[in-house]
Image: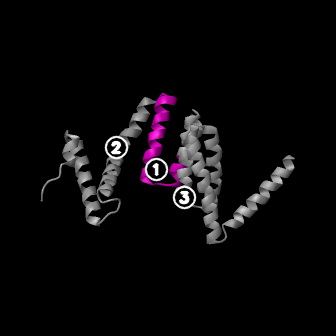
Amino acid sequence: MKKQRNDEKTLCDSVTLRLCDSDEDYEKVRFIALIHSRLGEIFLGESNGDLAIINFRKALYYSKLSKDNYYISQTLKYLGYSYQLLNNADSALYCYNKSLKTSSDIGNKLDIEKCIAQIMYFNKGERDSAFMILKNNLPDICLSMIRSLSQTMCGGQMKSRELSTSAMHDAAKFLKNRQTRSTPPHSFFLKKKR
C-alpha cells in the first residue's frame, strides 16, 4: 500500500510539473495554491494550527511550482504564524527567516520581524533582542504608515508622484526632527498653508 502511494505521488508530481508548461496551466497551479492558502487562512483564523499548516504546506508546494517569490514568501510567513500559534517557536523562526530570504518587501519584513520579536520576548526570554528588533524598525514603520495614509487620502490611488514624494520628504523630516529633539507626534500631521 505504501509503495502504491509513492507511485501515485510521483505521477501526481510529474503531472503538476507539466501543468506549468503553458500560461493557462500556470494560472491553474497558482489558483490551486491560492485555494490552499485561503483554506489555511480560514483554519488559522479559527485557531486550528494543525489544519492551517497542512494547507499552507500544500500552498507552498504549488507556489514553488509557479516560481512566484512574493507568493512563496507570503505563504512561508503564514506557515510561520501557524507554527507560532502551536508554540513551535523553532519552526516558526525557520519559516520567517526563509520568507525574509525569499522576498525583501518592506511590509513582509515588518510583519515578520514583529513576530520574531514576539518569539524572542515571550518564548526565548531575550527581551533586549526583541526590543532592538522593534527599535530598528521604527523608521520603516513610520514611513510605511505615512505611505498608507497618503494613499488612503487619495482614494487608494496615487494621483501624482508629487504627493508621494512630498509625503516621503515630510516623513524623513519628521524622523530627523524626532531624533534630534522631542516633537509631539500630532504636530507632524498639522498641515501648513502654502
Magenta portion: prevailing SS class: helix
Is residue 92 highlighted in magenta?
no
Please name whichever residue, 147 or 127, is drawn nearer the observer in this view of the structure.
Answer: 147
Q: Nearer the viewer, mark 2 or mark 1?
A: 1
Is residue 100 located in the magenta-colored stretch of the structure?
Answer: yes
* Spot occupied by residue 22 in the image (x, y as percentages of width and height): 65, 72
The residue where tag 3 is placed is: 69
View extreme (bottom): residue: 22
Alpha carbons under labels 2 and 1: distance apart: 15 Å
Quadrant of the frame with the C terminus: bottom left
Location of residue 117 in the rendering, given as x and y in whole percent from the top left corner: 45, 37
Residue tagged 1: 108
User: What's under tag 1, amino acid-wise?
Assistant: Asn
User: Which residue is at 86% across, 50% downward?
Assistant: 3
Q: Which residue is mark 2?
A: 138
Contact, mark 3 vs mark 2 (Cβ under 8 Å): no
Residue shown at 59%/46% (left/top)?
A: 40
Q: Earlier in the sequence, mark 3 or mark 2?
A: 3
Q: Are marks 2 and 1 in contact (CB under 8 Å)?
A: no
Is residue 93 among the parts visible in the rendering? no
**In screen coordinates, is 152 left or right of 184?**
right
- Disc 1 + disc 3, Cβ < 8 Å: no
Numbered disc 3: secondary structure: helix
Magenta region? 97-125
What is the C-alpha distance between the residues marked 1 and 3? 12 Å
Q: Secondary structure at mark 1?
A: helix
In the image, residue 31 above or below residue 43: below
How many labels, in total? 3
Residue type at mark 3: give it: Asn
